[in-house]
Image (cartoon, rainbow, N blue to C red):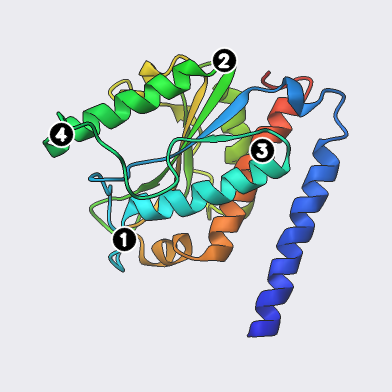
């Protein structure tokens, strides 16, 4: 089992290196691409959904986001994280959970709007009342983020989703952060914590690596595609 794990890890590393070599052959350098902001959804007093094993969505989001940050930095994009830990330093006057959530969402929007030429990528997990639904899905907030969302979706169809039902869609009007942020933004629902098989994968390091490779590889590929988003 240990040999197999090492072998699979080596394959993943080789895939990352190959992806980099392919992407950097594009005519334009990543230096001219948007500044990537990686947002692990929830955190602090807002744990989000809970997996079947009892793990908080905010923890899974952070694990995937940190892997995305590492790959994005490897690709030369100088990413920015909205949080690095489960702890959030709330202001003293935010005494209720609701007030803290509102402050946190406003803070993330302010960060997104303070960065010139930003691309905001928020990592989340889905949950449903039954255990049936599964699959990753990407939502976008404008015409610039739409082709990037579709590029990620194509790779999800190829490597993650069992079917092609979960197409890229515009983000809902009632999700504050993605309309308060004035830059292109993506909401990535990596899978369903209510689905036993998918929840187990979402908590595994190997699946998290796969998700991060798809997300960052697709983003960098889209940004370097002369016919794609820039």
Residue at the image point whose x is 65% and y is 40% from the top: 72
Q: CA distance from mark 1 to mark 4?
A: 22 Å
Tag 1, which secondary structure?
loop
Q: Nearer the viewer, mark 2 or mark 1?
A: 2
Q: Is residue 19 left or right of residue 220?
A: right
Location of the N terminus (image quadrant) = bottom right
C-alpha gap between disc 4 and disc 2: 30 Å
Residue under the image location 73 percent in, 36 percent down:
76
Q: Establish if 92 lies above or below 128.
A: above
Q: Is residue 198 above or below residue 34?
A: below
Earlier-in-chain disc, 2 versus 1: 1
Task: Tell me if label 3 and label 1 are in contact, CB under 8 Å.
Answer: no
Question: Tag 2's secondary structure?
Answer: loop
Q: In the rendered structure, find residue 192 and report the number of the disc placed on it.
A: none
* 4 sits to left or right of 211: right
Precedes in sequence: disc 3 or disc 4: 4
Q: Secondary structure at mark 3?
A: helix
Assess whether mark 4 and mark 3 are in contact (beta carbons under 8 angstroms).
no
The answer to whether the residue labelled 1 contacts the one labelled 4, judged by CB atoms less than 8 Å apart, is: no
Task: Determine which of the numbered discs, if any, sits on residue 98 in the image.
Answer: 4
Q: Earlier in the sequence, mark 4 or mark 2?
A: 4
Which residue occupies 75% across, 28% down?
A: 30
In which image quadrant can residue 229 be found?
Answer: top right
Residue placed under numbered mark 1 in the picture:
51
Per the image, the residue denoted by label 2 is: 116
User: What is the distance, in whole Å, between disc 2 and disc 1 at their CAs?
Assistant: 36 Å
> Residue 33 in the image: x percent, y percent?
70, 23
Q: Spatial distance from mark 3 to mark 1, Cα to Cα?
A: 27 Å
- The label on residue 218 is 3
Q: Residues within 10 Å of mark 2 (few under 14, many from 20)?
A: few
Percent of width and height locating residue 68: 58, 46
> Callout 4 environment at 10 Å: few (<14), some (14 to 19), or many (20+)?
few
């Amino acid at each position: 089992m240990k040999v197999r794990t090492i072998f699979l890890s080596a394959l993943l590393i080789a895939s990352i290196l190959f992806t980099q070599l392919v992407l950097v052959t594009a005519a334009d350098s990543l230096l001219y691409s948007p500044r990537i902001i990686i947002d692990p959804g929830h955190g602090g007093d807002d744990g989000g959904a809970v997996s079947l094993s009892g793990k908080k969505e905010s923890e899974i989001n952070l694990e995937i986001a940190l892997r995305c940050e590492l790959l994005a930095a490897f690709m030369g994009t100088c990413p920015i994280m909205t949080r690095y830990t489960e702890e959030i330093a709330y202001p003293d006057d935010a005494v209720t959970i609701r007030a803290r959530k509102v402050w946190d969402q406003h803070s993330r929007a302010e960060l997104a709007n303070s960065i010139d030429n930003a691309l905001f990528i928020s990592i989340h997990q889905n949950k449903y009342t039954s255990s049936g639904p599964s699959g990753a899905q990407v939502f976008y907030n404008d015409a610039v983020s739409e082709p990037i969302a579709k590029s990620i979706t194509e790779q999800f169809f190829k490597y993650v989703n069992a079917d092609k039902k979960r197409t890229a869609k515009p983000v809902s009007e009632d999700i504050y952060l993605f309309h308060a942020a004035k830059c292109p933004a993506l909401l990535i629902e990596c899978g369903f914590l209510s689905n036993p098989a998918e929840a187990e994968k979402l908590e595994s390091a190997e699946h998290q690596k796969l998700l991060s490779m798809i997300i960052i590889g697709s983003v960098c590929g889209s940004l370097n595609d002369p016919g794609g988003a820039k």
